[in-house]
Image (cartoon, grey):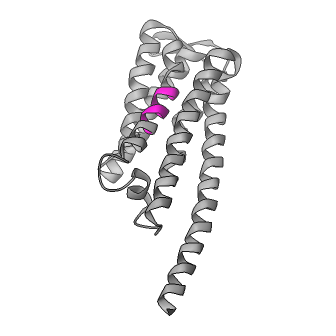
């Protein structure tokens, strides 16, 4: 569920981006609503609202959420300041690669891979399987970042669609694959444990 909360600002961004730009009057001021720059402003505001609400409810944000919010503010802010969507195109690749770096670094920092620290309270697996699963997350984030970068600078007319629905689709598929992996190995692990207890 937490992964999909992160997509709320992106979906709002997509909706506004797809609108035909029009002049809107508000409080005596006129501005353009629709298109990349107003969509970027909506992305920033929605991110602040979503993560601000989560912070008020939970009294904390996860590190990944802080990274996502900070990247949104930095790259979104630069996009609006310099009126160039190039900065926003780099947001998804950079965030994904930072996540990949975090998962990879956990093999050398601390006593457990990052994915084990996240799921270890609910799932029991042998150490080698945690390592494999953690490396799978590293590979996923590296691939996702590269895919976003490639589409953003190669298929200009589709990059926003891919940023929202392509990223969401890849995440869903990966989570399904992770679920299958966990279910299969949890069953094997429980079977082995039961056999050992009988011995």
- Of 186 and 176, which appears nearest the observer? 186
Q: Which residue appears at 40% of the width and 66% of the height?
A: 121
Q: How many marks?
A: 0
> Where residue 117 sits: x, y (%)?
38, 57
In which quarter of the view is residue 155 placed? top right
Q: Which residue appears at 63% of the width and 24% of the height?
A: 160
Above/below status of 199 relative to 59: below
Q: Which residue appears at 51% of the width and 27% of the height?
A: 93
Task: Give the main secondary structure of the magenta stretch.
Answer: helix
* Residue 182 located within the stretch drawn in magenta: no
- Of 49 and 173, which appears nearest the observer? 173
Q: Which residue is at the far front?
A: 199
Q: Which residue appears at 52% of the width and 34% of the height?
A: 9
Q: Which residue is at the far bottom?
A: 198
> Where residue 48 sits: x, y (%)?
40, 33
Above/below status of 53 relative to 125: above
> Where residue 100 sits: x, y (%)?
46, 38
> Where residue 157 sits: x, y (%)?
70, 17
Q: Which residues are magenta?
A: 92-99
In which quarter of the view is residue 154 placed? top right
């Amino acid at each position: 569920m937490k992964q999909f909360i992160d997509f709320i600002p992106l979906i709002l961004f997509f909706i506004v981006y797809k609108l035909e730009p029009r002049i809107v009057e508000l409080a005596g001021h006129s501005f353009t609503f629709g298109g990349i720059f107003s969509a970027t402003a909506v992305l920033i505001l929605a991110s602040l609202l979503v993560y601000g609400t989560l912070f008020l409810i939970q009294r904390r944000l996860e590190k990944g959420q802080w990274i996502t919010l900070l990247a949104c503010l930095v790259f979104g802010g630069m996009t609006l300041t310099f009126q160039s969507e190039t900065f926003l195109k780099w947001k998804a690749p950079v965030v994904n690669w930072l996540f990949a770096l975090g998962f990879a670094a956990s093999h050398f920092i601390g006593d457990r891979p990052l994915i084990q620290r996240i799921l270890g309270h609910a799932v029991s697996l042998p150490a080698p399987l945690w390592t494999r699963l953690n490396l799978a997350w590293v590979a996923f984030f590296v691939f996702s970042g590269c895919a976003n970068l490639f589409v953003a600078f190669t298929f200009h007319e589709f990059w926003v669609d891919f940023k929202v629905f392509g990223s969401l689709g890849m995440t869903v598929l990966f989570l399904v694959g992770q679920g299958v992996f966990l279910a299969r190995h949890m069953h094997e692990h429980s079977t082995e444990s039961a056999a050992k207890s009988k011995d």
